[in-house]
């Protein structure tokens, strides 16, 4: 087994775990914070949009079962890559989208994937998702881990109420 890491910021991390959790070859999906300038940030600190951190997920996966390219495709289908101000209901830098790359190969694949999405014509605005070399990832507090399993009622109301689920359905025409 060849374990690898993928790190994505897609707005609220609660909504980013479930889509990846269901794939064979994905060993874990952890909610957390990355990209900022303070060590061991708390949820409350990150929500102030003053730490430079974004809510993100870090995926440990077996790249012999699921490829990084497949993970990128799943990622793009969870977000509005044209929104520079956050994602859906959540606004501010802590909710901006990003792909954090762990190797030159991931960087290359992420850039190719972004360019292909830009050229696809699916969106009429530019793709603004950042592609950034990965740095320290800080796991979020336990209450935020696998929120969709711990608090399914609240999670479902949030995923629908934020506009994310409607956007995904209208953009991709299917459950993603």
Image (spheres, rainbow, N blue to C red):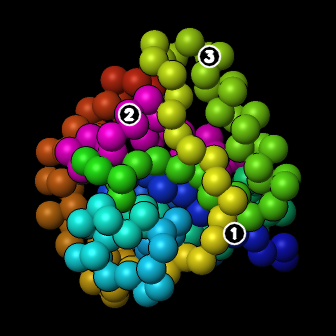
Determine whether, in the image, residue 167 is placed left or right of residue 28: left
Rendered view: 172 above or below 156: above
Picture layout, residue 13 above or below residue 114: below
Crowd around label 1: few <14 · some 14–19 · many ≥20 (10 Å): many
Is 160 a magenta residue? no
Q: How many angstroms separate mark 2 from mark 1 (CA)?
A: 25 Å
Give the residue displayed 29% in from the left and 50% down from the top: 92
Q: Residues within 10 Å of mark 3 (few under 14, many from 20)?
A: few
**Residue 144 position (above or below residue 99):** below
For label 2, the residue is 83
Residue topped by disc 1: 5
Label 1 secondary element: strand
Inspect the magenta stretch and tell me whether residue 70 lies in it: yes
- Residue 165: image location, x then y, percent: 29, 40
Marks 2 and 3, the one that precedes in the sequence: 2
State the quadrant of the N terminus.
bottom right
Residue 120 is marked as 3
Q: Position of residue 105 (x, y in %)?
A: 85, 52
Q: Please name the residue shown 37% across and 69% down the image.
A: 51
Q: 62 and 103: which one is in front? A: 103
Residue 7 in sight in this render: yes
The answer, for residue 80, to whether it is visible in the render is no
* Residue 68 % position (x, y): 73, 53
Helix, strand or loop status at disc 3? loop
Ranked by sequence position, the earlier of labels 3 and 1 is 1
Task: Identify the element where label 2 is drawn.
Answer: loop
Separation of marks 2 and 3 at Cα, in angstroms: 17 Å
Q: Which residues are magenta?
A: 69-90
Q: What is the spatial separation of the Cα atoms under label 3 and label 1, in whole angstroms?
A: 27 Å
Q: Name which residue lies at 53% across and 28% down.
A: 127
User: In the image, which is nearer the foreground, mark 2 or mark 3?
Assistant: 2
């Amino acid at each position: 087994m060849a374990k690898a890491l993928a790190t994505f910021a897609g707005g609220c991390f609660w909504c980013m775990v479930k889509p990846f959790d269901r794939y064979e070859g994905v060993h874990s999906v952890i909610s957390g914070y990355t990209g900022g300038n303070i060590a061991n940030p708390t949820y409350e600190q990150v929500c102030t949009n003053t730490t430079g951190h974004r809510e993100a997920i870090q995926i440990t996966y077996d790249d012999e079962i699921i490829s990084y390219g497949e993970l990128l495709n799943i990622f793009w289908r969870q977000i509005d890559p044209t929104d520079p101000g956050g994602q859906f209901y959540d606004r501010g830098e802590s909710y901006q989208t990003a792909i954090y790359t762990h190797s030159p190969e991931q960087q290359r694949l992420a850039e190719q994937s972004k360019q292909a999405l830009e050229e696809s014509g699916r969106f009429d605005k530019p793709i603004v998702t950042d592609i950034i070399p990965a740095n320290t990832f800080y796991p979020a507090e336990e209450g935020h881990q696998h929120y969709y399993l711990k608090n399914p009622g609240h999670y479902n109301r949030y995923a629908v109420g934020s506009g994310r689920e409607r956007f995904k359905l209208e953009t991709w025409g299917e459950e993603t």
